[in-house]
Amino acid sequence: MNFENRTGEPSSVHWHGIRIDNAMDGVPELTQDAVPDGGDFQYRFVTPDAGTFWYHSHSRSWEQVARGLYGPLIVDERTPPDVDADIIVMIDDWWLEQSGELRDDFNSIFHFSHGGRLGNYAKAIVSQSAVLEGDRVRLRLINTANARVFPVDVDGVEGNLVALDGMPLKAVRPIDTIHLAPAQRADIIADVTGDIEVSFWTGQEHYPLATINAEGSNPSTRTFPIAPLPPNNVATTNGDADIHVTLKMQGGAMGGRHPGDDIWSFNGTSGLQESPWLNLQRGTVVRMTLVNDTSFPHGIHLHGHHFYEMDGEISLWPLRDTSLVDARGSRDILCVFNNPGKWLLHCHTLGHSVTGLKTWVEVA
Ligand code: C2O
Ligand code: CU
């Protein structure tokens, strides 16, 4: 990928969810210098996993991503599932003026210290706007918003959730409301029963995000069940960890005092320090308890790896690259750190990350 920066300011590209060679990860503080305006950078990498990923700016990301520097990155399975349509549903929200222009106050302390820069207008950009009734479709939902957690509902289909954050589920699940933190993805395979309506619950109403019209019908209606996607080659686990660590989030509005020197902190420090939070030998299995001691939800993203969300039965733990931790909640994750390099760990509400909610780990 030849990246030509013509944006007028320094930038870089991060390939979110790709278990990538560290030098290609696109993080200016850790893995490369930001590419100056007018400069080029050649990203060369292997995509080890099939699935739904995305890419976005990792420089002044709270502004550059909000301005649109992102896109989907789809890696096909060697034998893709048998569907009639494969549709990308890229969800975002924007904070707009009355005129429809994007508001340009990106550095608001109010937003940074609350839930981030939530938009007043939301929409899903879909790669295909019509299907046939009876079609079997794959929908790839991507939350590209820089702050909003979307509780997404999909109507007009009958089927299953088959993947999260690009990684196939071991067993398909019913489609319920899908809570997507910033950067999270979900793949659905389902049969079309009517117009497909994608919406989210605002707390008051179902806000429409996209409609994919069902025009005409597909006589070759499939009846066989929806099977799990073929697994990617990620290190498996018996659930045992070599070390157990806690990562505590503090700060923000309505949060009380904390020892960090910015709005947010992880384990008492704000932002990237000289040395990594964890120094790990390659292959170390880490159990991490993510403790959210704040009044806001945070979607915590680890670069270069997928990890298990320790949720329910071990055999069903989903692999994710971003984990949503509710306000005042906590969650345990288990990660086999087998990708060498310097990896960022941060909140994907990008205004939180820039005001302290980030750290890094090094895998030797
Ligand atoms: Cu999606 Cu550090 O990024
Ligand atoms: Cu956050």
Image: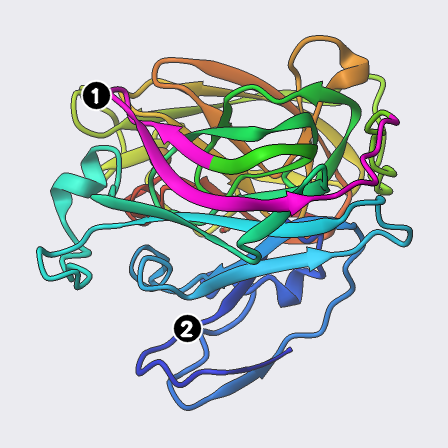
Q: Which residue is mark 1?
A: 255
**Residue 175 versus residue 354: which sits nearer the camera?**
175
| Magenta segment | 198-224
Q: Earlier in the sequence, mark 1 or mark 2?
A: 2
Q: Where residue 195 sits: x, y (%)?
A: 53, 38
Residue 137, placed above or below residue 312: below
Residue 42 lies within the magenta run: no
Q: Residue at x 37, y 64 (%)?
A: 68
Residue 201, placed above or below residue 132: above
Query: Residue 37 bears which disc, if any?
Result: none
Crowding around mark 1 (Cα neighbors within 10 Å: few <14, some 14 to 19, many 20+) is: some
**Residue 194 versus residue 344: which sits nearer the camera?**
194
Residue 215 lies within the magenta run: yes
Q: Residue at x 71, y 50 (%)?
A: 85
In this view, the residue farthest toward the bottom is 38
In this view, the residue farthest toward the top is 312
Quick one: quadrant of the N terminus? bottom right
| Front of the two marks 1 and 2 | 2
In this view, the residue farthest toward the left is 98
- Callouts 1 and 2 close, C-beta under 8 Å: no
Q: Which residue is mark 2?
A: 11
- Give the amino acid type for the residue marked by disc 2 in the picture: Ser
What secondary structure is marked by label 2? Answer: loop
Q: Where residue 118 sits: x, y (%)?
A: 25, 41
- Give the amino acid type for the residue marked by disc 1 in the picture: Gly
Crowding around mark 2 (Cα neighbors within 10 Å: few <14, some 14 to 19, many 20+) is: many
